[in-house]
Amino acid sequence: MKRFATSCLLAIGLTALPASAGTPLPKPVIPNGFGVNIHFRGEPKDLDLIRDGGFKFIRMDLAWAGVERKKGVYDFAKSGYDALTAGCVKRGIRILYILDYSNKLYESERSVRTAEGRRAFAAFAQAAATRYKGKGILWEIWNEPNIKIFWRPQPSVDDYCKLVELTAPLVKKADPSGLVVAPATSEIPFKWLEACFKKGMLKWIDVLSVHPYRPHRPETVIKDYARLRILIKRYAPRGVKIPIISGEWGYSNINWDKARLSNEKQARYLVREFLINLHQNIPVSIWYDWKNDGVDPNEREHHFGTVTHDLKPKAAYTAAAALSKNLAGFSIDRRLPPADDKNFAFLLKKGKRRAVAFWTTGEACEVTLPLAPGRGLLLDMLAKDRDPPTVSWKGKGLKITASPNPQYLLIDAD
């Protein structure tokens, strides 16, 4: 494919288009919005394992430099993206493609800072959206542009926003089924985000993505989402709602504070992260990472995976599959008391069926779930029991031991 003429790009890019009528984000139903970041192309057996683990999304770099090796010529087939796209579609896995990074044909650094570079990047993005249109892809513009490792020599709100302003309308026009996502920030940098909003970002995108990494437990994100929504409401165009997605977030077995996380603790954090995001109306939760990226015992980046480097399931994979299977089709109705910073219990519904997911962030303790008299099956997050115990309760509710590992109570229908 050849790039469109520069004058055409500029004419379209400088005019903000209305919010996309693309394929909607998934409804808040387990496991519709659960996904993983991947680092492969083509159609390896990983895709079958991802599907079988209950993941419905993948997030993957669609690297500019790998596709455009000669100015104006794009090769999606040899670079492996045709096969990856087809493989995901065949398995019912929705795609979030990250349009990134720089290209030495136009830019000297890992960023886009020149007018020529912006036009070339926007043309590449338009070519990708044209090639894969109609598949409901989430088109994310760059990855973590707020940190130096991904935007060199120094992050720039001005340069990044110019790139989004030019690129977003071209992508929307090329793929009406898609959604434009940005800015995929490292953590939730409120000052940086507000600076982007002041430049007009919320007029150009459909979905706001953040990466809420933290050394602390997942539940601490609740207050950050509340603060972010206030900021979005302040700057979003009148009558436009911009949803938030958790585009990348996980816990390595080597945590950010260098503490070691057992496989079991990593698994509990995955489940709690997904459920907290669901309760917070975050329609897509992408876990970083699909598999361990290496075998160095002291390298943090090698231990984020749900499976090992040779694709053996870790506890995180088992827990994700158990959550997706045991609570498939359920959505969170409300949080149950005791609702404090320590104890979490959510009532879930699926038609007339009811379930409860509950845990504590501290030591195991007894809690009382305010439920009408009944009975049900009690499931461990790792599905350890082939024959799960039946529990019954009368009177004022169910007294039960909550632990840091989430448990699921599947309540018998009346």
Image: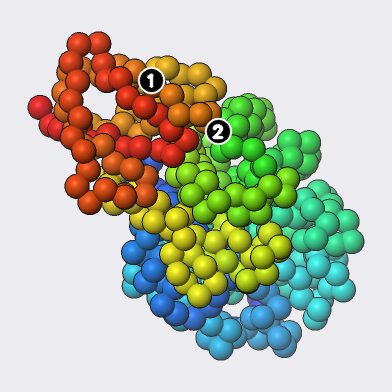
Expressed as whole percent of the image width and height from the top left, the position of residue 379 reads 29, 41
Q: Nearer the viewer, mark 2 or mark 1?
A: 1
Residue indicated by mark 1? 367
Is residue 237 something one can see in this rendering? no
- Give left or right: position of 161 versus 325: right
What residue is shown at x 54% (from left), y 61% (from top)? 305
- Give left or right: position of 317 versus 12: left
Residue indicated by mark 2? 219
In this view of the protein, which residue sits in the foreground, 223 or 368?
Answer: 368
In this view of the protein, which residue sits in the foreground, 38 or 340?
Answer: 340
What residue is shown at x 73% (from left), y 73% (from top)? 120
- Does 345 sit above or below residue 328? above
Q: Are marks 2 and 1 in contact (CB under 8 Å)?
A: no
What secondary structure is found at the residue carrying circle 2? helix
Q: How many marks?
A: 2
The amino acid type found where label 2 is placed reads Glu
Expressed as whole percent of the image width and height from the top left, the position of residue 363 reads 51, 29
What residue is shown at x 60% (from left), y 32% (from top)? 220
Distance between the Cα atoms at labels 2 and 1? Answer: 18 Å
Callout 1: few (<14), some (14-19), or many (20+) C-alpha neighbours within 10 Å? many
Q: Residue 335, which numbered label?
A: none
The amino acid type found where label 1 is placed reads Val
Expressed as whole percent of the image width and height from the top left, the position of residue 153 reads 89, 61
Callout 2: few (<14), some (14-19), or many (20+) C-alpha neighbours within 10 Å? some
**Residue at far right of view:** 153
